Image: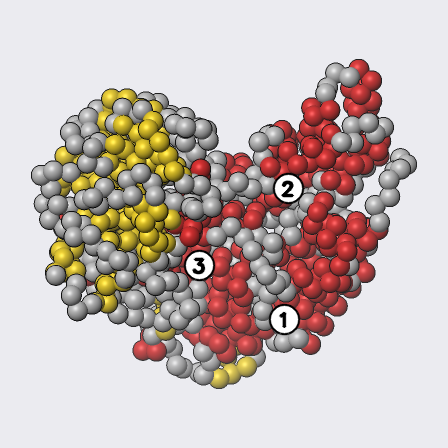
Amino acid sequence: MVTKKKVTESKYQIAHLLRRAGFGSTLEELNHYESVGYKKTVDELLTPTDVTRMPDSLIMRYHTETSATMGPYGGPTEWIYRMVSTNAPLSEKIALFWHTIFATSVTKLSGAIPMKRQISMFRDNGLNSFDNLLISLSKDPAMIYWLDNWTNHKDEINENYGRELLELFSMGVGNYTETDVKECARAFTGWTVVNGDYIDAQASKCSFQPYGRYAWQFQYLPEDHDNGEKTFLGETGNFTGEDIVRIICKQEATATFISRHICNFFLADEVPVTQWPYVKPNNPKLIEKLKKVYFETDYNIKEMLRALFLSEEFKDRSNFYKKVKSPSELVISVTRLTDKFGNGPRLDARNIFLAMVNMGQHIYNPPTVEGWHGGLEWSDTGTLVERINFCSEQFGNTESPGVKKIIDSLVAKYDEDPLDFIDSCMETLGSIEIGDETKKTLISFAREHKSEGSLGPTNYAKAMMQLITTTREYQLC
Amino acid sequence: MITAKSKNFSLKYKKTIGFSGKRGRGFFYPRDLAIGSNKKMYVLNRSHEVDSYGEPESVRVVICDLDDGFHGVAGHFGEKDGQFIWATSVALDSEGMIYVSCEYKNTITVFDPEGNFQYKWGKYGTGDGEFSGPSGIRFDQNDNLWVVDHKNNRIQQYDKFGNYNFSFGDSKLFNLPWGINLDNQGNIYVADWGNNRILKFSTDGNLISEMNGNGILKNPSGVAVDKNGTIYVADSGNETLQVLSPEGEPIFSTRGQATMSQWGQEFLDVNPDEAYPRKSSDLEYNLDIPKNSSPHTISSYSDKYFWGLTAVAVDEDSRVYALETNRHRVQIFDPIQ
């Protein structure tokens, strides 16, 4: 299929980068980043300056439940506003990344204040050194309660956190022994939360009386810490939790595990993590490159991402559209593009969250400690209908400032021939690309309605946007 | 430090009323309160989080009193008459009729003193008598209702039946104003939320003065004035009750001193599995919290600090009522002058 208009390869690459490191882009954002160039775009994404987003005070004024977060909507709604309104999308994307790996659920916590603080910790520390992140994670009150480390005592070990730290959070199955799990757990004894008994009493009954919930705090109790000698991954000493993290981070297996996670989330879908010991990665050479950066930069996640985004593999067209958009990626990208919250908070913000849930991703509540498997598992007959209906509904809502703006710009191009008009639509929607067969269908639709004049300019533009955003290709990023 | 005092003015903590409750007695994300006769309090509850019954019954006006009595509820969540979606403020006229503003439906809904729906008015728009997000509402001594039409950045005056009288203000003056109140002389005080200040107007809408507490106010949401002209501000951005002299000088402030309310104690008495661990817990802000935490974040750890301080009211005895959205309660103070 011949494309008459020419979008530069550089622009396509930046659009690809913004889909992976962010939530897609508007035409204006894309034009801005094209003007600064690919490398500087990577820099801006990794180290944003002049960060703006909708203020918490404004969100809380309308959505009272986003602050104390006792019910099911408050926490996710607050995060959705952040993801939609921020000009630093990678900060939110990295929080989603770690939320997927260090999967913690609000259902056990019963009250979202600690979940909200955990997501905030991912946002703040998610691009730092992996050892710092693991220390923060081990001190995170939500994680301590979620994986029972608050009941991990020197006289009565609870291995739950120690096991998941090794299996799902850092090294992966097959790289440690059962003894290592026990020794790891011993090192984290005494790492607990303040007021654990009261937290448990409220959480186990979903109680919010008499005065609601309280924020949780980490507490180290030296009298409950096992000070004995431990042997962990071949090293022996009087290890603390910090020592355990230090030993974990210098393992080859950890570098491999984190590099593969980064490739899985930002480059191309892999098989679920439980199959990694048995299935080779899609991009073993790239993983080796990232491992090298991991060790050279003291386990720095930001530098690993920089290496990924600047790699030829990432920019190669063979890796475009290799990922199924997660529900959060689809929903947030559409909501940003349509500028649904452009006039401020809206009552139906919760519907954005519910749309994600109906598509299979309940943020704040991953299905298991493995997080979401992703990839093709996002799409079945039920969720596909949800995805298509959501896109069609949002792009059909001309009250949204972004939709109105897009339609106005496309109406001005109503006289273009159908092929050019479709190209204009795709450029306006963030320089997306679609396959030849899909394009033929769109052209056929456009020619039919253009010749008949059955749709006026506004409805013609709206219908074309709805069609494009409900294509198979739009479900990919 | 919990309080800051001047030589001539202080507030003495009296008691706390309320506890978290989704229906009947109790408050759930309360947003505003009005003080009636016979020590009665009318507490407007805002949250519309869907509960286990599939409908947020928590949205209601709870009628109670200073002695912890519970007298019933008015209103409900919904689109029908007598219901609201995003309820913002509650006011009482001279006959004790209850008025509730809803910034989503753009309506004022009226109930009789027992909570029965009477009538409503209002629709969306920018013209005279139309609303774009009515927030704070209060009556003057002549039974005129003053309405903060917050997204239109103006103040409107109506009679008690909803007949429009006049309005003043625009986006050059206001930035999403919220609470409103009047003094004994009929002067109007508006919490100009987005501009971090209190504005005082004459009855005909002329600006008299601007007060920002020497720059300390941050997103004030509620304001009240006692019979001496002392001004009380729900300084929501600082989670602080600020007291200003009639000239606008800061003379006192408090972060709150809550103790267990009677309703809360009754809950704990029948739930010892929560009462015992609560008793041995440390629910105060004296632990390892990052130094640069916002007042809002600090309050989330504390039992006695205001958390979600939103509204303030003063009764005829100059007793001060400070309402906290996130702790579902009202802290009450007596003035010492």
Q: Above or below — where is A132 with respect to A364?
A: below
The quarter of the picture where the N terminus of chain B appears is bottom left
Foreground residue among B221 and B264: B221
B62 sits left or right of A333 in the view: left
Earlier along the polypeptide chain: callout 2 or callout 1? 1
**Residue A422, position in %: x, y?**
79, 33
The residue at 59%/41% (across/down) is A339
The residue at 56%/39% (across/down) is A340
Question: From mark 1 to mark 3, how far is it between C-alphas?
Answer: 22 Å
> Would residue A397 be seen by someone viewing this image from the given angle?
yes
For the residue carrying disc 1, how many other residues have a C-alpha within 10 Å: few (<14), some (14-19), or many (20+)? many
SS for dot 1: loop
Q: Amino acid at mark 2?
A: Leu
**Residue B207, position in %: x, y?**
35, 47
Q: Amino acid at mark 1?
A: Asn
B26 sits left or right of A145 in the view: left
> Would residue B28 be seen by someone viewing this image from the given angle?
no
Q: Chain of mark 1?
A: A
Earlier along the polypeptide chain: callout 1 or callout 3? 3
- Residue underneath mark 2: A337
- Give residue B238's quadrant in the image: bottom left
Which mark, by number, is residue A300? 1
State if disc 3 and disc 2 touch (CB < 8 Å).
no
- Residue underneath mark 3: A117
The residue at 33%/36% (across/down) is B147
Q: Nearer the viewer, mark 2 or mark 1?
A: 2
SS for dot 2: helix
State if disc 1 and disc 2 touch (CB < 8 Å).
no
Foreground residue among A81 and A455: A455
Q: Are marks 2 and 3 on the same chain?
A: yes
Earlier along the polypeptide chain: callout 2 or callout 3? 3
